[in-house]
Image: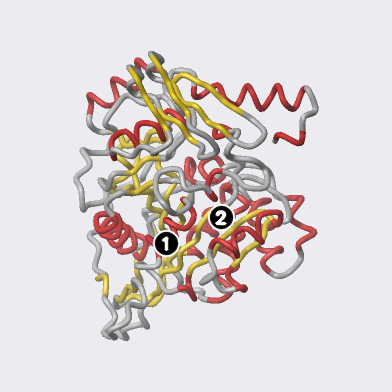
Amino acid sequence: MRSSRSTSNHAPATSSILSPGSSKPSGISVSSRASILSKGCDGRWKPTDVAKRRPARKLHVVLLAGGSGTRFWPLSRKARPKQFHALTGKQSLLRETWMRVKKLAPASRIWVVAPKALAASVRSELPALRADRLVPEPSPRDTGPAIGLACALIAKHDPQAVVAVFPTDHVVRDTKRFADAVRVAVSEADQGSLVCLGVRPDRPATGFGYLRCAKQPVRGRAVDVSRFIEKPDLRMARRFVKDGGYLWNAGMFVWRAERFLAEMARTAPALEAAVRACADGRFRMWTRAPRISVDYAVMERAHQVRVVPLDAGWDDVGSWAAVSLLLEQAGVRSRDVILIDSDRSVVFGDRRMVALVDVPGIAVVDTDDALLVVSREGAERVREVIEELRRRRREDLL
């Protein structure tokens, strides 16, 4: 099992988060007396002591809008995957994410990475997105290349930038607590750390990776990450929840762009070379970037990795069962659905009246060309339907 361990205790942060003085927010910035980071004899990146105050370091936000969302078939398709749908509210998950992060940074510092095939859909969903802030991936190659390319482009525009990376298919209910956690993470990143946002587990989930903390995590404070843990079995997950020293790896990160790229050059040099070349316009190098997640490529082997606990009503909305639970908790129900002795069931689709009688705990997804009926327990197996459709060469349904 791969892991990443911190080498020493983290020095107290000396930077401060500044709110711009104008009436119109321009996002998070960091000011300190350090102008550069240097690597100390203990191997940790630290601010160099200089007399002059440097300009405030600005936060850039990267939104990851790729992913096929196969677990949400038949609603989610290649041409319009999960993040483009309003699964839990009136707006798409992508749009909800944009509204959440625009409180952290202005549109000029919000970047969206998406496959070329989804570029038009992104523009339609996010009309405020600047054309030069849409980063089209030549082809999907997982989060390692996607995040690396975005950071390389941002570093060219703003070498001092701090970058926050967020998926666009998650739900965060408490936006204030979310922003507070990001501010703590930005302050840590300014000191040279690679920072994760970790969610305190409220159940023994086996579908998430976990972060083992060097000491008990406390909201509002960062702690060292001593280990990345793959998706555990149920027995291990129960132990993690009981222990209290583990957080879910939510796939949200904050770091200095150049600091992250320097770490990538050490842990995945071929990937770093490829994304730097693409940022310089040599996109033929994209095919040399390995297909790899950012955790495998960098984070699990990186130095000085920290985590900030996120207690903001987060959910990765990973299956129809998760959506069903979220809607149930919110008391959302369609007018054209009748449920009789069918507790914990949910219906998606507005094409016709749907009635369920004595079938508790199922999800019904009704679209123009396909109908899915699945139990909550079997929601993770929807991918098997995709595999069967591919075997039958039913590309029209994918």
Mark identifier at residue 89: none
Q: Do the residues labelled 2 and 1 touch (CB within 8 Å)?
A: no
- Around disc 1, counting alpha carbons within 10 Å, would you say few (fewer than 14), some (14 to 19), or many (20 or more)? few
At x 39% / y 27%, what residue is drawn?
A: 338
Q: Which amino acid does label 2 sit on?
A: Ile
**Which element carries disc 1, helix, strand or loop?**
strand
At x 59% / y 65%, what residue is drawn?
A: 152
* Residue 292 versus residue 133 in the image, above or below: above
**Which element carries disc 2, helix, strand or loop?**
helix
Q: Between residues 186 and 70, which one lies in front from this camera angle?
A: 70
* Residue 252 versus residue 279 in the image, above or below: above
Location of residue 54 (image quadrant): bottom left
At x 25% / y 45%, what residue is drawn?
A: 311
Residue 118: image location, x then y, percent? 66, 55
Q: Which amino acid does label 1 sit on?
A: Lys
Mark identifier at residue 39: 1
Residue 320: image location, x then y, percent? 47, 31
Q: Between residues 366 and 319, which one lies in front from this camera angle?
A: 366
Q: How many marks?
A: 2
For the residues labelled 2 and 1, the Cα–Cα distance comes to: 24 Å
Quadrant where the C terminus sits is top right
Q: Between residues 291 and 95, which one lies in front from this camera angle?
A: 95
Q: Is residue 127 left or right of residue 49?
A: right
Mark identifier at residue 147: 2
- Around disc 2, counting alpha carbons within 10 Å, would you say few (fewer than 14), some (14 to 19), or many (20 or more)? many
2 or 1: tag closer to the N-terminus: 1
